[in-house]
Amino acid sequence: IAPISNFVDMRNYYEGRHDLISSITEETKIFCKKLISYQAQKRDLDLAVESYIHRVAQSRNGEGIFAFWLGMLAMAKAQEISVSLFNDEGILSLLNPAIRSIDTGSQNGGQVIFVPDKKDNFSISYTIRGQYLHCIFTHCRNKVYEIIKFTKAMSNALKAILLILAEKN
């Protein structure tokens, strides 16, 4: 599963700010693998959603790790110190995810669009309004076919999730 990050607003702080979290937890990985093999059940979905909500809550309480690593990286760079830990694949995937997403639903109906940080990556700006999911994908032209493939897979996954939810109601 490619590294994916999601912006989290932290308006509860006086000056407000944002953090960036990894959207992938152990529970979301398990759910995705089961979804692909048509074995996912509502309990798997519930666990994945609960783990994501927990991670967002931690970040909103100032317990996120992205800002910490970004601050440490900036300090090392300013002091011209080479830190081998900053070459760790896991940390690099957090600081430079393949996909960045942002929920723009709190933007008073407006749409915030941001660009990927590297030419091989892409970003998704999304809003959930009622029963609709509005997405804007930002990418380089050479990624058009990959984006088409990704959006078809995303559509199929959303349909599968709706079927899981419909079975239990």
Image (spheres, rainbow, N blue to C red):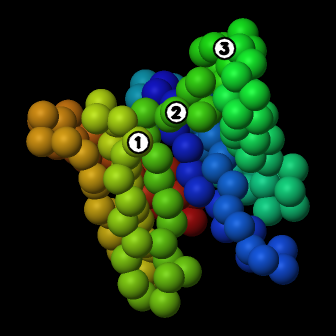
Q: Could you tell me how far apart the alpha carbons at marks 2 and 3 are, in whole angstroms?
A: 12 Å
- Position of 137 compared to 60: left or right? left
Residue for badge 2: 96
Residue for badge 1: 117
Q: What residue type is labelled 1?
A: Asp
- Position of 51 compared to 138: left or right? right
Image coords of residue 4 (percent x, y): 51, 38
Secondary structure beneath disc 1? loop
Give the quadrant of residue 53. bottom right
Near mark 1 (Cα within 10 A), the count class, few <14, some 14-19 or many ≥20, is some
Query: Label 3 near label 1: C-beta < 8 Å?
Result: no
Near mark 3 (Cα within 10 A), the count class, few <14, some 14-19 or many ≥20, is few
Instruction: Check the image and report above or below for 135 versus 77.
Output: below
Q: Quadrant of the C terminus?
A: bottom right
Q: Is residue 153 visible?
A: no
Image coords of residue 19 (percent x, y): 69, 55
- Toward the viewer: 108 or 31? 108
- Identify the residue at horizontal 63%, vertical 14% (top origin): 87
Q: Among all residues in the image, which is located at the extreme front? A: 79
Image coords of residue 63 (percent x, y): 87, 50
> Considering only order in the chain, which callout, 3 or 2, is on the residue closer to the N terminus?
3
- Toward the viewer: 21 or 51? 21
Q: What residue type is labelled 3?
A: Asp
Residue for badge 3: 88
Q: What residue type is labelled 2?
A: Asn
> Considering only order in the chain, which callout, 1 or 2, is on the residue closer to the N terminus?
2
Query: Label 1 near label 2: C-beta < 8 Å?
Result: yes
Secondary structure beneath disc 2? loop
> Considering only order in the chain, which callout, 3 or 1, is on the residue closer to the N terminus?
3
